Amino acid sequence: MRAPERSTVWTVARFEGRERLRTSAVVAALLSAYGALFVWVGPELVGGEELQALLDAMPPVLVELLGFESLASLSGLLAGEYYTFGWLVGLAGYVAYTAAGSIAGDMETDRMDTLLAAPISRGSVLSGNFLALLVPIVVANAVVPPVLVVAAAAVGESLPIGALLALHALSVPYLLCWGAVGLLLGVVIGRSRPAGRIAIALVFASWLFESVLDVSDYARVGAVTPTRYLDPSAVLVSGEYDLLGAAVLLAATALLVAASARLFAGRDL
């Protein structure tokens, strides 16, 4: 990429990123409050006999499917419940939805025609919009960990800080991959709301698909889903870091963004 084009990409990224700062702060605040709630009820929940009785009464397959087998500690509760629904589904769905509308929304409102009337390439616009997704991703991953650590200390508990930071670092490739999926959907469909809804549906379906396959004889099929490559329980409870999985997600992200750029370059606006 030539220097002038790189400069244009960063200009677009900075502009779009500033537009997302307020929403990103709201998302981070909501995720922090949601996590603090889990920490607040965690000690009573994981130490209660009612929970163990409930788990003993449930079929083992269902316990594993919902991630309940890790609920023996606060870290396990956060990994199995909070990070599953807050990160694997919730934040990923938001990033995918935002990415889907970033290009498609501009095409719907004719803002894209105005933007491209300036000496700027389509590839720069698309790349800048994708890089702007780092704003909600970085803000959420920077704000939530210290909130959880402080909340845990307030209730007399502790969290493995190293594993917590590793989980948030490993979530970045996962979230970027879903951003790339949303970007491609936006380019292909060309309408922000349908593309965004499909993106959210894919995130949820990916989690459900992987969860069901993981407890079946067809676990290998789940390798096609991004959810396969980020396991909060493995990181936060067992201290296992899947660096190869992160590399796979980054490679998939690069391929999806390249495909989006190629399709966008030849699309009629």
Image (spheres, rainbow, N blue to C red):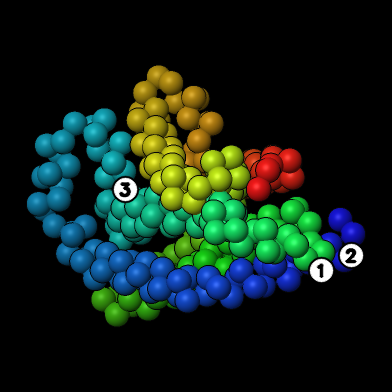
Amino acid type for the residue under numbered disc 2: Ala
Mark nearer the N terminus (1 vs 3): 1
Residue drawn at x 31%, y 72% is: 33
Whole-angstrom CA distance, mark 2 to mark 3, is 50 Å
> Which class describes the residues within 10 Å of circle 2: few (<14), some (14-19), or many (20+)?
few
Whole-angstrom CA distance, mark 2 to mark 1, is 6 Å
* Residue designated by label 2: 3
Q: Are marks 2 and 1 in contact (CB under 8 Å)?
A: yes
Residue 63 locus on image (x, y percent): 25, 38
Judging depth in this view, the residue of 125 and 203 nearest the camera is 125
Amino acid type for the residue under numbered disc 1: Ser
Judging depth in this view, the residue of 60 and 15 nearest the camera is 15
Residue drawn at x 79%, y 57% is: 121
* Residue designated by label 3: 70
Residue drawn at x 51%, y 47% is: 191
Q: In the rendering, which numbered label is found on residue 242?
A: none
Name above or below for residue 189 compared with residue 76.
above
Judging depth in this view, the residue of 263 and 48 nearest the camera is 263
Q: In the rendering, which numbered label is found on residue 7?
A: 1
Judging depth in this view, the residue of 184 and 122 nearest the camera is 122
* Residue 102 shows up from this direction: no
Amino acid type for the residue under numbered disc 3: Ser
